[in-house]
Image (cartoon, rainbow, N blue to C red):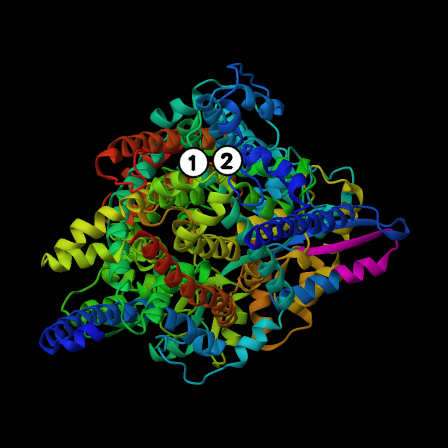
Amino acid sequence: MHQQRPRENVLHGIDSGTETISGKPVPVALKKSKTAGKQRTENVNHVQKTVTKSSWLKSKSLRENLAGYGFISPWLIGFFLLTAGPLLFSLIVSFSDYNITSEMTFTGLDNYKKMFTADDLFWTSLWNTLYFVLFSVPLTTAGAIFIAVLLNSKIKGMKIFRTIYYLPAVLSGVAVYFLWMQLLSPGTGLINLVLSWVGVEGPAWLFDPNWTKPALIFMKLWSVGGGMLLYLASLQGVSNTLYEAADLDGANIFQKFFHITLPMITPIIFFDIITSTIGAFQIFQEAYVMTKDGDGGPAHSLLFYNLHMWNNAFEVFDMGYASAMAWMLFIIIMILTAFNLKFSKRWVHYEGGDNK
Amino acid sequence: MKKKKTLSLLLSLIMLFSLILAGCSGQNSSGSAEDSGGKVTLKFWSFWGSETRRPVIEKMIDDYNKSQDKVVVKHTFVPWGDIWTKNLAAVAAGNPADVVVTDINDVSHRAKNNQSTDLSQYFDDNMKDRFYPHLWETVLYDGKPYAAPFNTDTRLLYYNKKAFKEAGLDPNKPPTTWKELEEYAKKLDVKKGSTYERIGFYPLWGGYGAPSWMRNADEGKNFLEGNKIAIDTPAKADALSWLADWKKRYGKKTIEKWDAEFANGQTNPFVAEKVAMYTDTGTFYTQIRDSGKDLDFGVAPIPAYKEGGRNWSDGGGFVLEVPKGSKHPKEAADFIKYMTDVKAQKYWAEKNYDNVANKEAAESAAKGMDGQEKMVYQASIDNLKDTQLAPIPIQYPDFMSRINPQIDAVMLGKAKAKDALKKAEADVKKIKRK
Amino acid sequence: MKTAAQQPKFYQTMKFRRNLKHSIILFFLIAGSIALLTPLWWMISMSLKSPEEIAQFPPTFIPEKFHFSNYIEAWSTGPFTRWALNSVFLAVVGTIGSVFVNSLVAYGFAKLKFKGRNFWFVVVLATMLLPGFVTMVPQYMLFSKLGWINTYLPLLVPSFLGSAFFIFLLRQFMMTIPNEFIEAAVMDGAGHLKIWWHIMLPLTKPALITVAIFAFNGSWNDLLGPLLYLNEEHLYTIQLGLQTFKGSVQTQWNYLMAMSVMILLPTVLIFFLFQKFFIEGSNISSGTKG
C-alpha cells in the first residue's frame, strides 16, 4: 500500500484521477464537485484543482478528453515525431523537381500536369491497378470469409487445417514468386496440368498480356490466410446463444450465416475492405519481382501504379514526380475511403452502440 | 493487486528493453571512421555475398589491408538490387559508404544527379590505360571519371556441336550472319508431331534481347546516341520484323510456353539441350561446366546483320564508385586503384571465371587456363572489341519503358515494326528531361 | 451430451446431421489444403535437390535423391545463427510493443469520447494511404539525423508508437464490445486504464492474438527495414541472410529454398501455439456475452 502515492501520480495523466491502485472506487470528482464552483482552466497541470472546482458534467468531459488524448498519445508522438515530417516533405517535394540528392527547384503544378498530359504510362498503370483492385478485393474478401467460417467449425483436427490455410500468408520473398512462376508455367506447371484434366487448355499466364493480371489475382487468393485469420478472430466474438436460438427457430445454415454471422462481423469486413483496397492499390512487390527488373511485364500489363512510381523515383531519380503520383493516389484512395466510411453507417453494425 | 503488478512489471520490462537498445545503439554508432591506431576505416558495400564470390572479394580486401598501414577496408554485403536503393538513401542523408559497387551503365546518370564523387583529382593520366576503352568511356561524365570499371561481360553465341553433327552441319563452322543463323536454325529444329523437341535458335532467349538485335542491324547504333534519337530507323524496323518472323515461325504458343519454362533461370534451355544455339555471356560457361553434363559446344561471335558486317555484341559490367558525401574520397580512390590493378583483377578473373576490366589481367588470366575454359574465356576477351555498352541517356533515363511496349506489340502481332518504332520515337520525345 | 443421451431419437438425427455437415466441410477443407500445400511441396522438394537436379528439365516433382544436408550446408554458409537470433529479438520486442501500444490507442479511439477523436482517426487512416516509397528517403534522413542508423531503433521504436493498421483493426474489434461493460465499470469507479487492462484486453483476446501474429510475421519477414538501416553484418536479420543465396549471376536455389523453409518454421510454430489462446479467448468472450 505504501506504493500507492507515487503510482497515482504516474497514472494521473492517463486516467485523470478517476481511481487509484487499491481497486477501490474513488470517485473523487463526483464527491467534491457537489460543493464546487464552475471555473475551468485549460492548464493540464491543474487538473486536480480544477476538477474539484468544476461541475460533475464538465469535469467528466474534461477527464474524458484527457483520457482520450492520454490513450492515443503513443500514436500522436509517433505521428508528430516520425510520420508527419516525411509526409509533409513528400507533399512539398511533389511541387518541385527534387532528384533526392541535389536539385529541388519549385516547379508549381508541373508534376501534376505531366501526369495528365505527357505521361501515357500514368494511365496504363492506373488502369492496371484499378483492374487489380476491382477483382482482387471482392474475391479475397469473400474467400477469406468463406474459409474462416469453415475453419470455425468445431471438428477435430481443425487446428491443423487452420495452420495449413494460414501458411501461405506467412510465406514471403523471392521463394514464393519463384514457386508461382513455376506453377503458372504453361508447359510443366501444375495449374495448367490440373486444368487439362478437365479439358481446359490453360493460357500462358505470365507471358500472355491478357492473363498476367488474373495470374496475380490467383496468387493473391492463395495467400488469403491473413484475412481469414481476421475473420476467424471476429467469429470468436459471435455468441453461441444466438445460434442456439436460431436452431430452435429451425433456421438453416444459410439463414444463420446471413442473419447472424455476417451482421456480427461487419466491423471486420469493413476493416478488411478498406485495408485490402489500400493494399491492392499499392501492389508492387509481385510485379517488381515477377517481371524482369520491374519493367512491367509483357506489353506493360503488370505496370502497376506503384511500380511506375518506383521507377520514376529510383530509376529516373524524379522524386518530385513520384511524390506527385503518390499524392494523386492518396487523393484517389481517400475519396474511396471517405465514400466507404459514409456508406458504412448503413451496413456496418457495431455491438458497441452509438459510436459511429 | 496481482494484475496491477504484472502490468507494471510489463511496462518496466518494455522500458528496460528500450534502454538496453539505446545502450547498444550508442556503442554501435560511435564506431566511426577513425580506427584504433589512427587508421582510416573505409566502408565498402558490395552484393557479392554468395558462397563463391564472398571469399574472393574478401581475400582481395584482406590483401589490400595488409599492403599498407593507413587504411582498413570493411566489407559489408548488401543484397543485389537493393544495394542501390540503400546507397541512394544514404547519399541523401549524407551518410554513405566510401566505396560501392554499381552498374556501369548508369554511372553518368548518377554523376549528373550528384550522387557520386568526381575522381579525376585522385586518378593519374595513365589510369585509363589499364582498362578496355569502351569501359573507361562509360565511366566518364563531362570528361571526368566518376568510377572505375571493375568487371564486365559480353554476349557470345554458344552452339551445341553434337546437334550440329546430327543436323549435318560442320561443328567448326558456326553461323556468321543472320541469314546463316536462320538456315542453321531450321536444320537444327527437331519436331515431333506439332511440338518441338528441340528448337534450333530463338533470338530472344539468352542474354541478347530485342534492343540488342536492333542495334546489331543498325551498325551498332543505339536507340539514343548520347541524346540523339535513332529509334525509328529502317535497319531497326527490319530487325524488329525479323524477330517477329522468328516467333511466327515457331508459333506464339510454342514460344510463350518455352518462355515461361525457362524464365525462372533455374533450368537453362541450352544446358538442357532443348535449344541448339544460344546467346549468353562468357561466364555462362560455368553453368555448363557445373551442370555435370559433358556438353560438346563451341562459341562464336554474335552473327552479323549482313555479310561483311561487324559482329556487334552487347555488354555490361560493374564499377567501383565513391558515393557523394564519403568522408574519405582520397583513401577510397586509392583502394579502387588497388582493386582495378592487375594483381587483384587477375585473382578475381581466375577465381570467378569472370571478365575483368583490366586488359592485362584478363590476358594473363586467359594464359593460365586450358581446354574449354580457355576457349570460352579467350573468345570473350576477343569479343570485347565489338562489344558495346548501353549507358543510360541522361535526358531520357527511362526511354526503354516507352520502347518496350512497342516491341511487345510487334512481337504479339498487333503492330507493324515501322509504325511501332515511329510511335516509340514519338513517345520517347515526350519524356525528355532537362 | 447427457441430456441428449436421454432422448436417443433426437440425438441420433442431430448426430447424423452434424456428421453430414462435418463431412461436407471436411471435404472442402481437404481439397483446399491440397491446393494450398502443393506450392509448398515444390519448395520443400527443391530444398532437397542437388543443384544438378534443379537444373534438370522437365523439373521433377519428387527429388531423385533427398539431400537433407542442404539444410545444414545452407545454414553454415554464413552466421545464420546470429542472424536468426537478431530476428527473434526484433520480432519479440516489436510484437510486445505492437500488442500493448496499439490496443491502448485503439481503446482511446473506440471507447473514449474526446474532442477531435474523429479528426485524429481520419488522420490515422490517412497515414496508411500514402505509398511508403516517397516517405522512405525523408524518413531515412530523419533517422540518420537522430543517429539511429546502424541500430535497431528505427526497427523497434515505431512498434512502440502504434501502427495505423493495428489501431484500426483493434478499434473495430473493440467497437463490437457492448458499452455496458465499460459503463458498469465506470459506475464502479474504475479508471480507463483499469478498464482497458481488466475488461478490454481479455475481451479482445482473439484480436490481440491476431495482432501478435501479424506483428511477429511482419517483423520476421521485413526485408526493407533492416536492409536500409543496418550497415553491419553482425546486426543483420535472417531475411537479409537469405539474400546471400540470390546473386547477380546465379542463384543457389536449393539453399535458398532450404533456408526459406527454415525461416517459415518459427512463424508456423507461433501460429500453431497461439491458436490455443484463440479458443480460450472465445470461451471468455462468449461466456461474458451469453
What range is drawn magenta here? Answer: B61-76
Question: Which class describes the residues within 10 Å of circle 2: few (<14), some (14-19), or many (20+)?
Answer: many
Q: Quadrant of residue A169?
A: bottom left
Residue nearest the observer in this picture, A350 or C290:
C290
Residue B141 seen in this snapshot: yes
Please give the label number shown on residue C109: 1
Q: Residue furthest right?
A: B37
Image disc number at residue A72: 2
Local crowd at mark 1 within 10 Å, few (<14), some, or many (≥20)? many
Instruction: Find residue B304 and report its image quarter.
Output: bottom left
Could you say whether the residue bearing mark 2 is in a helix, strand or loop?
helix
Amino acid residing under circle 1: Phe
The answer as to whether the residues below labels 1 and 2 share one chain is no
Q: Position of residue B389 (x, y in %)?
A: 54, 48
Establish if A92 lies above or below A125. above
Left or right side of C221 for A296:
left
In the image: residue C11, left or right of residue C165? left
Image position, residue B128 (x, y; %) = 71, 46
Q: In this view, does B233 lie above or below A96?
A: below
Q: Does the magenta stretch include residue B202?
A: no
